[in-house]
Amino acid sequence: MAPRRIKPSLYISVDIEADGPIPGPYSMLSLGAAVAGQQDPDGFTAADPEERTFYRELRPISEEFVPEALSVSGLDRERLGREGAEPAVALAEFTDWVREVAAGAQPVMCGYPASYDWTFLYWYLIRFTGSSPFGHSGCLDMKTLYATKAGLPLRAVAKGTMPRELLSRRRHTHHALDDAVEQAELFANLMAWRGPGSSPPR
């Protein structure tokens, strides 16, 4: 019997900015994504995170927002109401982009932490396009990845406690594309890292 061919995984770092804790009552205001790299049976190959990127700012879908959440991104809801992309259009464009960059591979969303960004991203994809290019479970949490490799409880993990060589040298700006690129570099470093005491990734 011939061995089953394993499809490569194409990891896409995604960051979103939103004006509240959950989608539906609150809105995803911006979406940034950057290809972080590809993994096949021979190992992981990092990508230049600035080479293949996606960014959109979206029209809010409700009048509700949490001022503290909105202030994190600094985005202007009134401006987005006039100039932001329609969610159905933006998410269809995002789906097309994911399928294009992941041709021949299985796309996997990765985030830090993935839980918040995935909640909004998946809800928006299903609500406005009816499907997800990542399936229903194609996400990987970088906090969990680090905790597993470092042998730490998840609650003990924060970027400030990670070895400095794992972190991107880019600033975390709360601009969705900037942060997606920054986190793509963190992901590539984590994939190369063998755990505490190992040589830093190149």
Image (cartoon, rainbow, N blue to C red):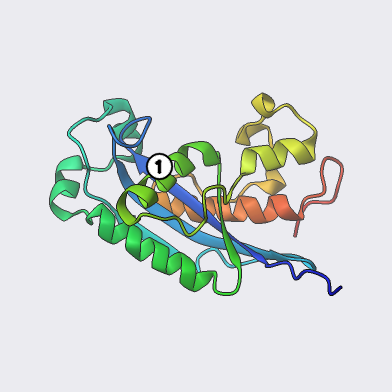
Place of residue 97 in the rendered image (x, y in percent of width and height, measured from the top left)? 42, 68
Vertical side of 182 occupied by 49: above or below: below
Place of residue 56 in the rendered image (x, y in percent of width and height, measured from the top left)? 32, 57
Vertical side of 50 occupied by 139: above or below: above
- Tell whether 93 sits left or right of 185: left
Q: Which residue is mark 1?
A: 120
Q: Quadrant of residue 65?
A: top left
Place of residue 109 in the rendered image (x, y in percent of width and height, measured from the top left)? 54, 53
Report the quarter where the N terminus lies: bottom right
Residue 113 appears in view: yes
- Tell whether 186 sits left or right of 71: right
How many neighbours does mark 1 have within 10 angstroms: few (below 14), some (14-19), or many (20 or more)?
A: many
Report the quarter where the C terminus lies: bottom right
Q: Residue furthest front?
A: 1
Give the residue at x 83% y 71%: 3
Give the residue at x 16% y 55%: 83
